[in-house]
Image (cartoon, grey):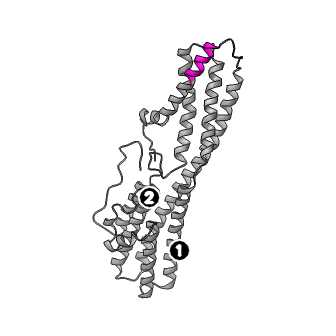
């Protein structure tokens, strides 16, 4: 997630550098044609590129709005995960009978592991990396039998809650409350996986890029009376504004791709780890993720 810090110019340039190369090639080609066949080309009124620019603005507004909706939904899902993770541990501490501190700690640490595992899974990374500090070797081996590692961790939660009930360490109403929290966690996982697996139509981006290049061509023809050393930078500057907005929307529409524009799932999981360990009165509390960069993963 981008922070309220100065974003390096290199980051902005890298987002559109290849697109600007294409624009430069198109601009030089059109400039060559207009110079060589100036008498044969009809007059291109500025109203045509102006109309195309307006159409691009409308299409970009729609894409930015839809992309932000996806990004914001992802952030709300992880906000719910924070709340439910805290509630889950507090419920375990208050609803179970005294003398169950060991099993409460075991489940709480597994919940921390679930948060990290879900974030890594959504980003296409190893979902069990570094989980050995939160769960046992036996549970790690159990996870290897499952394709969906975070879901397997929730299943282990459910088994432990059932055992607590069968051993008379939970009453039926407490079990129902804990099960409700597990259902909400599972629901949040499903929502995040839906956002991850639902692809924004690729054709929309292709059509939008095609219209931007058409805009560059028509604007270049309209400016055929302008000197090339002024026309080319002007075309690059105008097109870069459209391309940057389009690229920003493209990155926001996929909030789990391990990019600076992502939902900061790792930082959120770290916050959950800190909160849960403090609830357990642990002595070794990690520090929050540093914010020395212009983004937070």
Q: Is residue 37 left or right of residue 71?
A: right
Quick check: is 34 in the magenta stretch?
yes
Which residue does the image show at 51% across and 68% down from the upper left? 186
Which numbered marker is on residue 77?
none
Question: Would residue 129 appear left or right of 203 to someone viewing this image?
Answer: left
Residue 24's x, y, as percent?
A: 53, 25
Q: Is residue 35 above or below residue 176?
A: above
Q: For the residues marked 2 and 1, what is the alpha-carbon distance in whole angstroms?
A: 22 Å
Q: What residue is at 56 percent from the left and 31 percent from the top? A: 241
**Farthest top residue in view:** 39
- In front here: 64 or 103? 64
Image-quadrant location for residue 266: bottom left
- Residue that appears at 60% across and 21% down: 30
Q: Residues within 10 Å of mark 1 (few under 14, many from 20)?
A: few
Callouts 2 and 1 close, C-beta under 8 Å = no
Q: Residue at x 56, y 59 (%)?
A: 194
The mark found on residue 180 in the picture is 1
User: Which region shows up in magenta?
Assistant: 27-37
Q: Compared with residue 47, is residue 77 higher up or lower down, i.e. above or below?
A: below
Label the magenta part by its dominant secondary structure: helix
Residue on which disc 2 sits: 119
Q: What kind of element bears circle 1?
A: helix
Q: Which residue is at the far left?
A: 283
Helix, strand or loop status at disc 2:
helix
Within the image, what quadrant is residue 277 found in? bottom left
Image coordinates of residue 251 in percent, x first then y, are: 51, 45
């Amino acid at each position: 997630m981008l922070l309220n810090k100065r974003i390096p110019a290199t980051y902005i340039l890298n987002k559109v550098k290849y697109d600007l190369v294409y624009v430069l090639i198109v601009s030089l080609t059109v400039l060559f044609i207009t110079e060589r066949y100036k008498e044969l080309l009809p007059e291109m009124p500025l109203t045509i590129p102006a109309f195309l620019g307006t159409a691009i603005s409308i299409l970009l507004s729609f894409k930015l709005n839809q992309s932000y909706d996806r990004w914001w939904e992802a952030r709300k899902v992880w906000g719910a995960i924070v709340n439910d993770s805290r509630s889950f541990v507090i419920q375990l501490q208050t609803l179970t009978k005294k003398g169950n501190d060991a099993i409460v700690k075991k489940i709480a640490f597994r919940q921390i592991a679930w948060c990290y595992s879900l974030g890594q899974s959504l980003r296409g990374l190893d979902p069990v990396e570094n989980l050995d500090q939160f769960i046992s070797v036996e549970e790690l081996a159990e996870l290897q039998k499952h394709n969906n590692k975070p879901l397997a961790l929730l299943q282990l939660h459910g088994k432990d809650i059932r055992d607590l009930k069968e051993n008379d360490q939970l009453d039926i109403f407490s079990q129902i409350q804990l099960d409700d929290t597990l259902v909400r966690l599972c629901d949040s996982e499903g929502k995040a996986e839906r956002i991850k697996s639902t692809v924004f139509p690729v054709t929309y981006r292709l059509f939008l890029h095609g219209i931007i290049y058409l805009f560059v061509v028509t604007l270049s023809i309209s400016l055929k009376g302008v000197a090339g050393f002024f026309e080319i930078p002007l075309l690059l500057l105008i097109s870069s504004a459209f391309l940057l907005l389009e690229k920003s929307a493209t990155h926001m529409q996929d909030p789990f791709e391990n990019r600076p524009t992502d939902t900061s799932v790792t930082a959120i999981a770290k916050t959950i780890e800190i909160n849960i360990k403090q609830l357990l009165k642990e002595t070794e509390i990690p520090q929050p993720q540093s914010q020395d960069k212009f983004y937070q993963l």
